[in-house]
Amino acid sequence: MLQRFLDPATLASISGLDLVAKTVVDGFVAGLHRSPDFGFSQEFAEYRAYSQGDDLRHVDWNVFARTERCYLKRYRGETNTQLMVLLDTSASMAYGSHAVNKLDYARFAAASLAYLANAQRDAAGLIVFDEKVVNYVPPSTRQGQLFRLLHAIEGARAGTRTDFSSPFAYFQNFLRRRGLAVVLSDFYEDPDVIIRTVEPLRYKGNELILFHVLDPQELAPVFRQPALLVDMEERTTMEVSPEYARTEYRQKIDAHVAALREKARAAGIDYFLMNTGRPLDEGLREYLTVRQGRM
Amino acid sequence: MGFLTPWFLAGAAAIGLPVWLHLLRRHRSTPLPFSSLRFFERRTQSSVRHRRLRYLLLFALRTLVIALLVLAFANPFIRRQGGAAAGNRRLVVAAIDESFSMRYTGRLERAKQEAARVVAGIGGGDRGQVLAFGSRVRTMTDATPDVSVLQAGVRAVEAGDSRGSYAELARALRSMGQTAGVPVEAHVFSDMQKSSLPPNFADLSLPGSVRLVTHPVTAERVANVTVESVRAPRRVYDQRKVGVEATVANFGAAAETRRAALVLNGREIESHNVEIPAGGRAVVEFANLEAPFGMRRCEVKLSPADGLPEDDLFHFSVERAEPRPALFVEEPNHGRGLLYFRAALEASAQSAFRLEPVNAGQTANLNPAKYAFVVLSDVAAVPAAFEEALKRYVRGGGAVLVALGRMGASRGRVPVSGEAIVEARYFAREAERFETASWLDPAHPALAKSSRWDGVRFYQAVKVEPAGAQVAARLSGGTPLLIDRKMGEGRVLVFASTFDNISNDLPLDAAFVPFVEQTARYLGRLEDGPAGDTVDSHYELGEGRGGAAAEVLGPDAKRLLSLDEAARARSVPLAHAGFYEVKHPNERRELVAVNVDRRESDLDVIPAETLALWGNAPGNPAAGGGVAAEEPRPVELGWYVLVAVLALVLAESWLGNRHLAVEREPEQEAARKEAA
């Protein structure tokens, strides 16, 4: 029943990103079967050998007293990881053929991820970028982190054009802990360039998920008559016939998506195509699947 | 090929619309923001040209639809030879004269025998049709190759009382020649009565597709004597015997002697022998017609009868009645108006009305319906109940004469009719001293016999605003003197002065008596109509108002109108000779005597050369010749073109829908994918 609240058009009518995120996540969670990887109980999960840098507060001193070995006691609710959301706010993300444009959809997704991470005590951070880094919220589990993240997401506005190399290099500087990185973008770039740019994150042991946000009209454009299109980033114009949009364009965009998916898989990167006309839960399910793999 | 309405061809300019839409209109594209043009290519810019080529068939269809639509409105036609299209077939028309003169001994029988012989010979794909004609043409059968049907049609023809008209027959044949589509061979079986010819010979002309064959049933002129007319009073109001004058005409070549008898209700009351000169007339006078009360059927009858006995009889009606009461309302102590008015009314030869005077104050309980008319002679005021009763009386068909003087001018408006009174003028106090009646409408019934009022002086008059009513007389200063206003079925006549000799000296003038007499006859509806009508005329029933039904009994005492027709009919045709009894909604009864048009009694025949000329009229084939060269007949193509337009519109809709379906396809495909 709550599934209907995940519809983008419904979410667009909700003011307040925190409420959107709560609606999405609660609705999504309520629709799932019980999973041992969720919840906030103090149920024992495992012992892990202490390694340098681990928080001493989690050391089980009783075990240390008996065995003189340092073990960390971990609970299911405390299997935290670090989530970094990279939100593309290039001009092309402002495109939308219905009530929710791509940027809004990506903001809903980012807010929902942040809310989900916060609920699981994961440290969550945010980088908002177009051709440069626009905003950065370092990952943290401190009190109020969720609101800082939501505030940053709320303030994200469509900017100029996309340039992956600059913000990703910047992001690598901040990435000290291994974690999960989620890139929300329309990826209007050559797949090779995209993979080449994001692949270094993977080398440092991060799990990387590419959320490819596209509008239905971008995937299968429908024009009743020849249309004069204006590129939202380059501001160039071009007259397009309905026949071309119906045939060759679709082949090209399908090939682009297929190439990006293939190359991401080859590089060990998760890829998910987010159609802004579809409910948000599919993206969240993809995130949780990857996160489960990390535990 | 031609066009019946070529002006519609101007609509061809509308072809420019699809030309502009498809070929000339500049394609304007609204810039549409799109996220990235990375996957689009420059070569798609020729899309407009592509579109033009693609919709060329649609353009052609739309242009053709408009062109054919214009053509359909222009109503094109082609000329086609009717005979060529229909082979050698023809339509044989047997037109039998059923006018009154065919009642002459043996004439109709001979005509029917001859017609039966002609229709019996119809065959070989020909069709026949039987017509009967008198003053109008009746279709006895449809066009059919069945000889037995045609024979039955011939047998059904009976002589009537109407007058013959060859012009009506020619008009019907002209119409058949234009619509039959095949050559028409018209056989006319008639006594060829000369008096049935139209005044204008051109009215007999026939088109080239009609071949005329005449079959005269008699060749020589025969003698006939008839009662041509009767002069008798229509209504009698006193007990004196009245005189009747009958004119007897002899249409033969030898003098004739007849006995003329006056018959009242089937009883002969007086007779005279009369000698009528050859081709002349004689007058018979009956002096002893003393009709009892009521409507009486009278006849003047000749004996012995001749070959056409029906015209030896002339019907007329006489009504003996008591003088009808008329109400004269006056102010107390103003008796001079009554004195003059009554004296004038009684002075007329036929005193049809009896005046009943009453004071204005005593009218409250009076019912005006029983009076022939009501006179309000300079009354200051009448009780409201009586005025309302008068209004109802007038709307129901009554009549009121209002004389306005010093007393009447004290009111702001004329009683009953309600016209505004502008002022009361006393010319004796002004410079001109008096005014005269400068203009009289001689066509108004009230002034028909008194059109000269030159010597009458008017010292006082009340100026009334006519407000759309008819002004029948004016004074020299322009003041309306006599105003006639119709209200419902009745009327109100306003005389802007009085009937005494104070306001004017009209009562002392010679014009007063005929004016009062005519006014009384006009208001009392005593028209000086003829003693009877002729066959083929119409009797006016008045205005059909729905609900008020007049009942009309024919000469055979049967009702001529159904209840519904009686409520709506304004007139009734008089098709037969005899007495018609009419009962009006207001209980008034009338006996209408109807006689045959006496021109039918003149049995002189059309000269042979005139008959030959009719057969050989310009455009008409020779009477003895074969089938004539027909006039090419115009065949209209408008309907065919409209059918073609309909087919093209369907094709255009299908094609246009197909193009739209191509546009819709991607949406449906996307929806299918999503559902999957």
Image: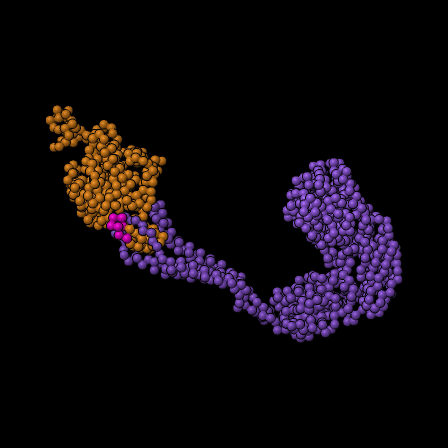
Chain colours: A orange, B purple
| A235 in magenta | yes
Q: Is residue B570 visible?
A: no
Question: In the displayed structure, does residue B336 sit left or right of residue B144?
Answer: right
For residue B211, above or below residue B423: below
Q: Residue furthest bottom?
A: B625
Please tell me which residue lies in front, B144 or A264: B144
x and y percent of residue B635 in the render? 56, 66
* Residue A266 vs residue B479, the one in the foreground: B479
Q: Nearer the viewer, residue B238 or A294?
A: B238
Identity of the residue drawn at 72% across and 67% down: B197
Instruction: State which quarter of the image contains the N terminus of chain A.
Output: top left
Q: Residue at x 80, y 61 (%)?
A: B228
Left or right: where does residue A195 sit relative to residue A281? left
Q: Main secondary structure of the magenta part?
A: loop
Q: Quadrant of residue B330?
A: top right
Could you say which quadrant of the image residue B107 lies in? bottom right
- The spot of residue B214 in percent (x, y) is 71, 70
Which region of the structure is painted magenta? A231-237
Q: Position of residue A220 (x, y in %)?
A: 32, 49
Determine the image quadrant of residue B61: bottom left
Left or right: residue B63 compared with residue B623: left
Q: Position of residue B225 (x, y in %)?
A: 82, 64
Question: Is residue B442 covered in magenta?
Answer: no
Q: Residue furthest front?
A: B431
Q: Residue at x 29, y 46 (%)?
A: A95
Give the quadrant of the C terminus of chain A.
top left
Count the marks: 0
Residue B434 in view in this figure: yes
Q: Is residue B313 left or right of residue A141?
A: right
Q: Residue at the spot x=28%, y=44% of the render?
A: A94
